[in-house]
Image: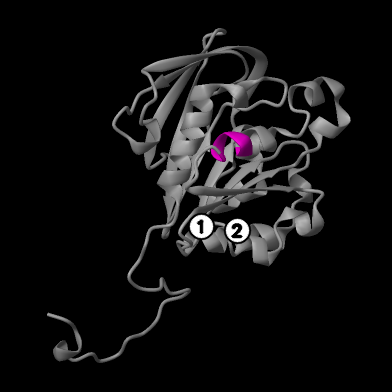
Amino acid sequence: MAEKIRVTVWNEFRHEKSEESIRTIYPDGLHAVIANALSKDAELEVRLAALDDPDQGLPLDVLNNTDVLIWWGHMAHHEVNDALVEAIRARVYYGKMGLVVLHSGHHSKVFRSVVGSTGNLSWGRNQKEIVWNINPTHPIAAGIPDHFCLESEELYAEPFYVGEPDETVFLSWFEDGFVMRSGLVFKRSAGKIFYFQPGHEECRSFYNEWVQKVIHNAVYYVKPAVSAFEIPEGAPHWGFRAADEFDA
């Protein structure tokens, strides 16, 4: 892995182009707001990518030089190339890249493929959300208060059909009375994935300091581990190995 953590923030970047009300909130795309916040950390090297860029924003030279991929999608999940999804899944599974999936990315091909679930949930109108920090000693929760409020965010609600996550970091309450496991860690093969619920395109959640800090913490948590050996892409057969071949 490079000395700096190489982060690629991927966004469909469609709503901001087609809807004036959303362009007013995120004139350069919601991915630009996320990237600007992350770029304040000199240890991160951040680039933007979008669906309508060449090779859907992730040609192999970019993907292979990404340590953490942040993914936001909504209206065009079906347009994402299956070969790209498989390349992302393989890179995560073999411990070469971490993945952070935001908001409506729960229904993306990438999330469904990597986590291995439908990603189905319930949803409703924009309303007040309280994000509760229910795992305060977790690295992704570092520096986050016991709760923070988002005055307007799209209701996402349980049941969230992702099975039992490896770690639950945040739980959200919405003013209509619903709850949502809103910050979840999944460990797959040698990789780590973090799903975070806030981030509806009609809302200003990505400007919130705590949302930005959660994403920042998540980058450090899911980044690839420094391994002393290459993780094999398969199941190698060692055969006979004498004891004296191994270090004492």
Mark 2 or mark 1: which comes first in sequence? 2
Most common secondary structure along the magenta stretch: helix
Q: Residue at x 65, y 57 (%)?
A: 85
Q: Residue at x 81, y 26 (%)?
A: 23
**Res 225 quadrant in image:** bottom left
Q: State the scheme by which the image is colored.
A: one colour
Residue that carries the numbered disc 1 in the rendered image = 97
Q: Amino acid type of disc 1?
A: Met
Q: Nearer the viewer, mark 2 or mark 1?
A: 1
Residue that carries the numbered disc 2 in the rendered image = 88
Q: Nearer the viewer, residue 138 or 241?
A: 138
In the depicted structure, whether residue 75 falls above or below residue 80: above
Q: Are marks 2 and 1 in contact (CB under 8 Å)?
A: yes
Can you name the residue that lies furthest to the left here? 248
Q: Amino acid type of disc 2?
A: Ile
Task: Give how far across and how far down residue 193 sits, in percent.
Answer: 48, 47
Left or right: 138 in relation to 21:
left
Q: Local crowd at mark 1 within 10 Å, few (<14), some, or many (≥20)?
A: many
How many numbered marks appear?
2
